[in-house]
Image: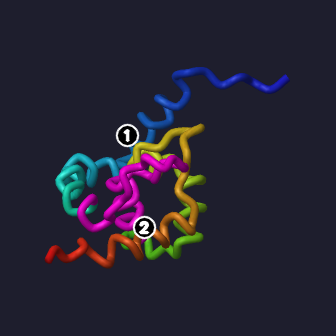
Amino acid sequence: MADQHGFFDLDERYAALSKAGDPLERLAAVVDFELFRPELDAALRRSDRKKGGRPPMDAVTMFKVLVLQALHNLSDAQAEFQILDRRSFGRFLGIDDGDRMPDETTIWRFRETAGKGPKPQH
């Protein structure tokens, strides 16, 4: 019979990552990514969600995905795989097992939309 994993197993893995000197943990400690939220929200021009539909991924989380891509030279497909595969990426993004993960299309759409910048006001 396979061993059941306990609640603290994930904590132990994260502690081992920290002990090994996870550079993403250090980056998250040095950079306050929440400072980017106002600019991201302005650039994304998201709807008010009154029409329903699936809620978008968090803007700061998605920005951090772009940071991971730049640091590790990852395509959108590779970023999707690495987010699913690497505990250090998940911890950096604030995503745990069972949470919704950004797929390659979501990453591409975020980059395209955020890259256009805020809508000009007349």
Q: Is residue 23 visible?
A: no
Q: Is residue 97 magenta?
A: no
Choose between 35 and 4: the one closer to the eye.
35
Label 2 sits on residue: 110
- Say which quadrant the N terminus sits in: top right
Label 1 sits on residue: 19
Percent of width and height locating residue 17:
43, 43
Q: Is residue 4 left or right of residue 27?
A: right
Q: Is residue 80 left or right of residue 19?
A: right
- CB-based contact (under 8 Å), mark 2 and mark 1: no
47 shown above or below 116: above
Residue 42 occupies which quadrant of the picture? bottom left
32 shown above or below 69: above
- Say which quadrant the C terminus sits in: bottom left
Percent of width and height locating residue 107:
48, 66
Percent of width and height locating residue 81:
60, 61
Secondary structure under the numbered disc 1 in the rendered image: helix
Q: Is residue 105 left or right of residue 37?
A: right
Residue drawn at x 40%, y 59% as measured from the top left: 62
- Label total for image: 2
Q: Is residue 16 visible?
A: yes
Residue drawn at x 55%, y 46% as measured from the top left: 100
Circle 1 packing at 10 Å, graded few (<14), some (14-19), many (20+), is: few
Q: Amino acid at mark 2?
A: Phe
Instruction: Name the outermost residue toward the right.
Output: 1
Q: Is residue 44 magenta?
A: yes
**What's the magenta region?**
41-69
